[in-house]
Image (tube, grey):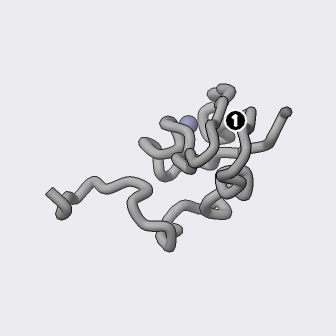
């Protein structure tokens, strides 16, 4: 099951998006974070409540690799 043609976000060193790669807010893994996300490509907005240890990106970001998504902390 490790070989699939549609692995998203499985490797930390993959930066195939046009943006900056993994946002710094996702690396603050030891804190609760509230992160506002906006897709600059299609205008979708959301708010993520990230628990300590969570480093996954926004689902929309993960499933639309070509979209440019901004993350910023709001807490
Ligand atoms: Zn989008």
- Percent from the top left, x then y, of residue 13? 50, 73
Which sits in the foreground, 18 or 10? Answer: 10
Provide the residue designation for mark 1. 38
Residue at image position (47%, 45%) is 62
Residue at image position (52%, 47%) is 56
- Percent from the top left, x then y, of residue 70? 71, 45
Horizontal side, residue 3 vs residue 8: left or right = left
Residue at image position (47%, 70%) is 14
Q: Quadrant of residue 49?
A: top right
**Secondary structure under badge 1?**
strand
Which sits in the foreground, 19 or 14? Answer: 14
- Above-or-below relation of 18 to 42: below
Which sits in the foreground, 66 or 8? Answer: 8
Mark 1 vs ligand 1: CB under 8 Å? no
Q: Quadrant of ligand 1?
A: top right
Image quarter (top left, top right, bottom left or bottom right) of the N terminus: bottom left
Q: Residue furthest left?
A: 1
Image quarter (top left, top right, bottom left or bottom right) of the C terminus: top right
Q: Quadrant of residue 19?
A: bottom right
Horizontal side, residue 7 vs residue 34: left or right = left
Horizontal side, residue 75 vs residue 48: left or right = right
Horizontal side, residue 51 vs residue 12: left or right = right
- Percent from the top left, x then y, of residue 30? 69, 50
Q: Residue furthest right?
A: 75
- Percent from the top left, x then y, of residue 34? 74, 33
Residue at image position (51%, 36%) is 60
């Amino acid at each position: 099951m490790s070989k699939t043609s549609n692995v998203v976000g499985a490797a930390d060193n993959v930066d195939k998006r046009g943006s900056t790669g993994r946002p710094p807010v996702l690396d603050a893994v030891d804190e609760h974070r509230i992160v506002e996300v906006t897709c600059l490509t299609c205008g979708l907005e959301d708010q993520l409540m990230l628990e300590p240890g969570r480093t996954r990106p926004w689902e929309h970001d993960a499933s639309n690799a070509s979209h440019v998504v901004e993350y910023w902390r709001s807490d």
